[in-house]
Image (cartoon, rainbow, N blue to C red):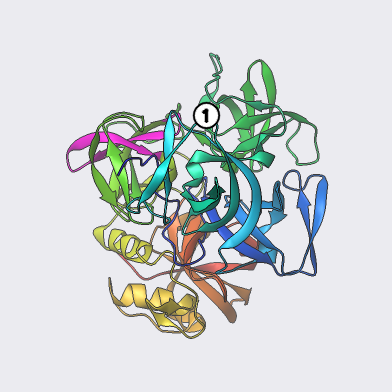
C-alpha cells in the first residue's frame, strides 16, 4: 500500500452506513430524502440554504448527531437525519474537489488500496467528484474516472467561511484540553444554541480549552475568544475527569472496512508496525491532533482516532462520558467484536443471516453465535431480558425502541459512549448510531442478557 492515512470510516456493502463515530461518527455514503421536502441548512438548526425535494440523493459526510452533514449539487450543509433513507446508488454530483495531502495521493482504479494506481495527484490538484462508493470518492481527472479516499479531498463548498487552521492552538492555564472532532469544520457560537451568531469555524483537529459542559454544549476558549460548540464535536484529552489514567488506558475497537495501519508515530509517513483488522481490541493511552496512541499485543503505536470506537475490552467509557468506568468481560467483548464484522450488511426484512438482517434478526444472530440464543422477535427479546436503567447500560446490553414497552419495533446492541450497532430499516445497512434524536424519543429501555 502506497498510502493509508485512513482506510475507511466504516465497513460497507454498497452504500456506506454511518458512524461515528465515535463520538465523532464520520461517514461517506449516499442517502435519499424520504420527506416531501427537506431544508438544507448552513448549520444544525441554522439558516436555510435551499429545499431538497423527495428522492434527492445526497452524500452524507458526518452523522455524529441527529443532524447529518451532507453534500448535494455542490452545496454542503446540514439536514435532519431522520428524513434520510440509505441507497445503494453510487453516482451523485458533489462538485469540484481539491486534493489535500502532504505531497501526493494515489488515483486508483477501484475504491480500495489494493487496486491499480493510475498515477499520483499532487496536493492542490482539482478534480470533479461524481459519486461515492465503498467509502471512497469517485472522481474524474483529465478525462479519466477513478477513486480517491475522502480523507484526501476537500469539496469546494467546504472552503467557505472563516475556517481556522487545525495547527493553531490555545494557551490557557484553566479548563480541560479538548480537540474539535468533525469531518470538516464546526461552528464556534456566541451562545449555547444553533440560532446564536457564529464567532468562527474551527476545523477538525483544532485545539480548544473546555471551560464547562452543560445541556449538550461545551463552553470553550479559543484564540482569546469564548464561545460554545456542540459536545458531540469536542473530544476532551487533557483532564483526568474525562479520561482513564494512562497506566490503564481506555479500551477501544478498530472500526474500518478491512484493516488500518498501526504506526510508529502520529504521522502517515511514519513506519508501519502492522495492520489491525476491523474489530481488533486495543487500549488507547492518549489522543492528540487526531491520532490516538494505543497499546496492542505489547506494542505502543498510533492509529488515526477516526478509526477507533471506545467500547470493547478492559475499560469502557460510561454513557455519560464521565470518569466513571466499568470493567467488561470477555463475553461482552465477543459480542461487540462479532457484531462489528457485519457493518455494511444490508437491511433485509425478515433477514437473520449475514446476507441480510432485520433489526432483531441481527441481534439474535449475534447472540446465538457468541453468548447464547435469545428470542427472534424484538418484542420477545424485550420481554425475555432483564431491565436495566439507561445510567447502568453496559456494552453488550440490548437497547429497545418503539411507541411503548408493549409495542417494541426496533432493537440494537449498545456499544458504549451513547452509541449502538443495529440494522436500521429498508434501504439502509448495519451501522453505528447515537442514542439521540429520534432514537432518544423512541427509546423504551434496555435489556441485559450477559451477567458476570
| In this picture, residue 392 sits left or right of residue 84 | left
Asked whether 377 falls inside the magenta stretch, the response is no
Asked whether 300 falls inside the magenta stretch, the response is yes
- Residue 386 location, quadrant: bottom left
* Of 133 and 200, the residue lying toward us: 133
Q: Residue at x 33, y 56 (%)?
A: 258
| In this picture, residue 385 sits left or right of residue 44 | left
Q: Position of residue 229 (x, y in %)?
A: 65, 35
* Of 426 and 281, the residue lying toward us: 426
* Of 200 and 137, the residue lying toward us: 137
Against 369, residue 114 (above or below) is above
Please identify the dominant SS of the magenta region: strand
Res 62 visible? no
For the image, the number of numbered tags is 1
Against 429, residue 170 (above or below) is above
Q: Position of residue 129 (x, y in %)?
A: 59, 50
- Residue 81 location, quadrant: bottom right
Q: Residue furthest left?
A: 298
Q: What residue is shown with label 1? A: 178
User: What range is drawn magenta here?
Assistant: 288-304
Res 315 visible? yes
Q: Position of residue 179 (x, y in %)?
A: 52, 31
> What quarter of the picture does the C terminus occupy?
bottom left
Q: Position of residue 237 (x, y in %)?
A: 45, 30
In what element is the residue under mark 1?
Answer: strand
> What quarter of the picture does the N terminus occupy?
top left
- Crowd around label 1: few <14 · some 14–19 · many ≥20 (10 Å): many
Q: Residue at x 29, y 29 (%)?
A: 270
Q: Residue at x 28, y 75 (%)?
A: 369
* Of 116 and 204, the residue lying toward us: 116
| In this picture, residue 412 sits left or right of residue 194 | left
Amino acid at each position: 500500500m502506497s498510502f493509508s492515512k485512513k482506510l475507511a470510516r466504516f465497513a460497507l456493502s454498497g452504500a456506506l452506513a454511518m458512524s461515528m463515530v465515535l463520538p465523532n461518527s464520520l461517514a461517506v455514503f449516499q442517502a435519499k430524502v424520504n420527506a416531501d421536502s427537506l431544508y438544507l441548512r448552513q448549520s444544525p438548526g441554522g439558516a436555510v440554504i435551499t429545499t431538497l425535494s423527495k428522492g434527492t440523493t445526497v452524500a452524507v459526510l458526518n452523522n455524529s448527531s441527529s443532524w447529518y452533514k451532507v453534500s448535494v449539487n455542490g452545496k454542503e450543509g446540514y439536514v435532519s437525519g431522520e428524513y434520510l433513507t440509505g441507497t445503494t446508488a453510487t453516482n451523485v454530483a458533489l462538485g469540484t474537489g481539491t486534493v489535500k495531502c502532504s505531497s501526493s495521493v494515489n488515483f486508483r482504479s477501484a475504491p480500495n488500496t489494493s487496486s491499480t494506481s493510475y498515477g499520483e495527484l499532487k496536493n492542490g490538484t482539482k478534480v470533479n467528484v461524481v459519486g461515492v462508493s465503498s467509502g471512497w470518492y469517485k472522481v474524474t481527472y483529465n478525462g479519466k474516472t477513478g477513486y480517491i479516499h475522502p480523507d484526501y479531498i476537500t469539496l469546494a463548498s467546504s472552503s467557505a467561511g472563516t475556517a481556522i487552521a487545525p495547527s493553531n492552538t490555545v494557551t490557557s492555564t484553566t479548563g480541560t484540553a479538548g480537540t474539535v472532532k468533525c469531518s470538516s469544520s464546526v461552528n464556534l457560537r456566541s451562545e449555547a444554541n444553533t440560532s446564536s451568531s457564529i464567532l468562527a469555524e474551527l476545523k477538525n483537529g483544532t485545539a480548544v480549552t473546555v471551560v464547562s459542559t452543560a445541556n449538550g454544549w461545551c463552553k470553550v476558549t479559543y484564540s482569546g475568544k469564548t464561545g460554545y460548540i456542540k459536545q458531540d464535536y469536542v473530544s476532551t484529552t487533557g483532564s483526568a475527569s474525562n479520561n482513564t489514567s494512562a497506566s490503564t488506558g481506555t479500551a477501544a475497537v478498530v472500526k474500518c472496512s478491512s484493516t488500518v495501519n498501526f504506526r510508529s508515530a502520529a504521522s502517515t509517513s511514519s513506519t508501519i508496525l502492522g495492520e489491525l483488522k476491523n474489530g481488533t481490541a486495543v487500549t488507547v493511552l492518549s489522543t492528540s491532533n487526531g491520532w490516538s496512541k494505543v497499546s496492542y499485543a505489547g506494542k505502543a503505536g498510533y492509529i488515526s482516532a477516526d478509526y477507533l470506537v471506545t467500547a470493547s475490552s478492559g475499560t469502557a467509557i460510561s454513557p455519560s462520558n464521565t470518569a466513571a468506568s466499568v470493567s467488561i468481560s470477555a463475553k461482552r467483548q465477543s459480542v461487540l467484536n462479532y457484531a462489528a464484522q457485519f457493518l455494511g450488511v444490508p437491511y433485509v426484512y425478515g433477514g437473520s443471516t449475514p446476507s441480510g438482517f432485520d433489526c432483531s434478526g441481527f441481534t439474535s444472530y449475534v447472540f446465538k453465535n457468541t453468548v447464547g440464543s435469545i428470542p427472534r422477535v424484538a418484542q420477545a427479546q424485550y420481554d425475555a431480558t432483564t431491565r436495566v436503567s439507561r445510567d447502568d447500560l453496559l456494552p453488550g446490553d440490548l437497547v429497545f425502541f418503539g411507541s411503548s414497552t408493549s409495542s417494541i419495533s426496533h432493537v440494537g446492541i449498545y456499544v458504549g459512549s451513547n452509541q449502538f450497532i443495529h440494522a436500521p430499516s429498508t434501504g439502509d445497512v448495519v451501522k453505528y448510531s447515537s442514542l439521540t434524536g429520534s432514537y432518544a424519543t423512541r427509546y423504551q429501555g434496555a435489556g441485559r442478557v450477559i451477567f458476570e
